[in-house]
Image (tube, rainbow, N blue to C red):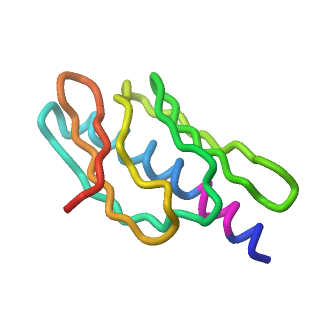
Amino acid sequence: YNDSMSNSTAKNVVDSLAGTASKLSGLGNGSSLSVGLEFPEDIQSFSVSGKTIQLFLNNGSGVKEYYAESRLDLNSVNLPINSGFHKVKASLNNGKVDFSEAE
């Protein structure tokens, strides 16, 4: 049960971040949006490169990769990889999306 819960939570993180980044394209340069996300336990790594958001989750049967694509280029992020609820801010600057932990 816990593995399937972590798996769906991990998928939700990458899908929500990619979707939030894509929404910014319609709002224009200088815009920002915040989203609240539940990060799963056992995240091995989390990265952003180009238009891809990747999360590697260490589940009972090994490491599983989750990824999602954005319509916009993404800058690298400084987001927590510890489990729990985090509010994430996405900002569009010069055609690239920056992610940071919201205050």
**Residue projecting furthest to the right:** 61
**Residue projecting furthest to the left:** 30
Q: Main secondary structure of the magenta part?
A: helix
Q: Is residue 35 magenta?
A: no
Q: Position of residue 24 (x, y in %)?
A: 27, 40
Q: Is residue 10 left or right of residue 74?
A: right
Quadrant into which the C terminus falls: bottom left
Task: Report which quarter residue 28 is drawn in.
Answer: top left
Q: Position of residue 27 (x, y in %)?
A: 19, 40
Which residue is more in the foreground, 84 or 20? 84
Task: Report which quarter residue 10 is drawn in.
Answer: bottom right
Q: Residue at x 43, y 64 (%)?
A: 37
Q: Residue at x 57, y 39 (%)?
A: 54
* Residue extent of the magenta highlight: 6-11
Q: Residue at x 77, y 59 (%)?
A: 59
Q: Is residue 61 left or right of residue 57?
A: right
Q: Residue at x 58, y 44 (%)?
A: 45
Which residue is more in the foreground, 85 or 20? 85
**Residue projecting furthest to the bottom:** 1
Question: Looking at the image, is 27 positioned above or below residue 1?
Answer: above
